[in-house]
Image (tube, rainbow, N blue to C red):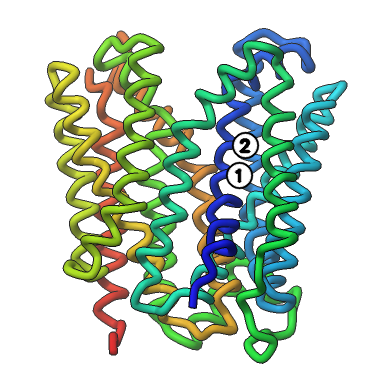
Amino acid sequence: MQDRASLGFVFAIVLIDMLGFGIVIPVLPGLIMHLAHVQISAAAAYAGWLGAGYAAMQFVCAPIIGNLSDRFGRRPVLLASICALGLDYLLQFAAPVFGWLVVGRLLAGVTGASFSAAYAYIADVTPPEKRAASFGLIGMAFGVGFVVGPALGGIIGSYGPRLPFLAAAVLALANFLFGLFFLKESLPRENRRPFDWRQANALASLRALRRQNETVLWFVAALGTWQLAHIVYPAVWSYMAIAAYGFTTRQVGMALAMVGFSSAMVQGFGLRRALPRLGERRAVMLGVGGLVVASVLYVVATNTAMIYCAIAVGALQGFVQPSISGLNSRAVDARSQGELQGAVQSIGSLAQIVGPPLYAQTLAHCTGPDAWIALPTMPMLLSAVIGMIALALFLKGASKLEVA
């Protein structure tokens, strides 16, 4: 039976990680300029490298953390991660030189890899047929963090450029103390397995998981491809809105807040109601359909109402990742949930490395006087094509899966 306090802690881990990621966005450019003694153009380039480093650390560390949680249990790994995250934000808060900030952002990527243990915890305590809906809670945490984090960072940052880091540290350490008293272990000792460094990477994990069920490879490929499609929003949506619709900064902020809010509602509440009727396969098809229709609406939009209609339709994308993750977790045994989620997160982190430059270059080549084609919304169409590839990979895996 699920323990509400423990599930609440896992939800809070993901939420605080997203809040911490978003809360520093408004102040990071100014802090980089101050510490590195550079202008905004160079600061933007540094920020890009910091983002790539963050994702690279997740690629390396997610399988390690997932495998460690299979060996020692979810509780110690989650507690260690959230405590380390809080201490890391204190490091960034106090950073006297740019090198300290670099180290802090890299360590944030390491601690952010705890998502693998968080997903494994949910798989431990949730019946297989209800895992997709429970995974939707993680998606809801992402959505809420995406909305609240930057807004909170902007407000707190107005009182001092370092204060958002301190606020993120307080949130993380408070959550650590809560978990210390209320988080229960979800993985019984009889379901644990030895830790092997040779298996603590994405490729080795996938080879081992494939021996249990070959559908895992198809589902992991689908999840990684889907994340590449979905990362268009944080990567270039704001720039696209300015180029295509002439949005002001305020309009961009409100629209992105609606993206996050609608996504959180779909994953947190809509998924629980719709999934029992639709099933995972139809839910994924509906979600990808929402992406395609929304992309077309963005292209033909001529007013703000049509743009918000596209946002509303696009929120159906929230059905995709939890549904695939739910089926994927049912494809392997209880001893391998951490390994599975580590591999998934590791592969997904590649999208954070590849996606931003891919969409940025697409936007650059479709705007301005030297544009190949004058279509600022082209990144959304590219996202839709990538989303359909993810659907094809998912359906191929689903066709091989024997559902009891």
Q: Secondary structure at mark 1?
A: helix
Q: Measured from the top left, where is residue 157 in percent x and y? A: 64, 17
Mark 2 sits on what residue? 20
Q: Measured from the top left, where is residue 244 in percent x and y? A: 26, 17
Q: Measured from the top left, where is residue 5 in percent x and y? A: 57, 62
Answer yes or no: is residue 370 visible: no
User: Above or below — where is 372 with respect to 356?
Assistant: above
Q: Residue at x 37, y 61 (%)?
A: 322
Seen in the image, is 3 located left or right of residue 178?
Answer: left
Q: Measured from the top left, where is residue 38 in percent x and y? A: 72, 11
Calculate the distance from the C-alpha at mark 2 to the C-alpha at mark 1: 5 Å
Q: Residue at x 69, y 75 (%)?
A: 73
User: Label 1 is placed on what type of residue?
Assistant: Asp
Which of the two residues, 129 or 388, is positioned nearer the viewer here?
129
Cβ–Cβ under 8 Å for marks 2 and 1: yes
Q: Which label sits on residue 17?
A: 1
Locate the C terminus by quadrant. Answer: bottom left
Q: Residue furthest right?
A: 96
Q: Secondary structure at mark 2?
A: helix
**Neighbourhood count class around disc 2 (C-alpha, 10 Å): few under 14, some 14–19, many 20 upward:** many
Answer yes or no: is residue 214 visible: yes
Q: Residue at x 73, y 37 (%)?
A: 169
User: Above or below — where is 26 with respect to 1?
Assistant: above
**Neighbourhood count class around disc 1 (C-alpha, 10 Å): few under 14, some 14–19, many 20 upward:** many
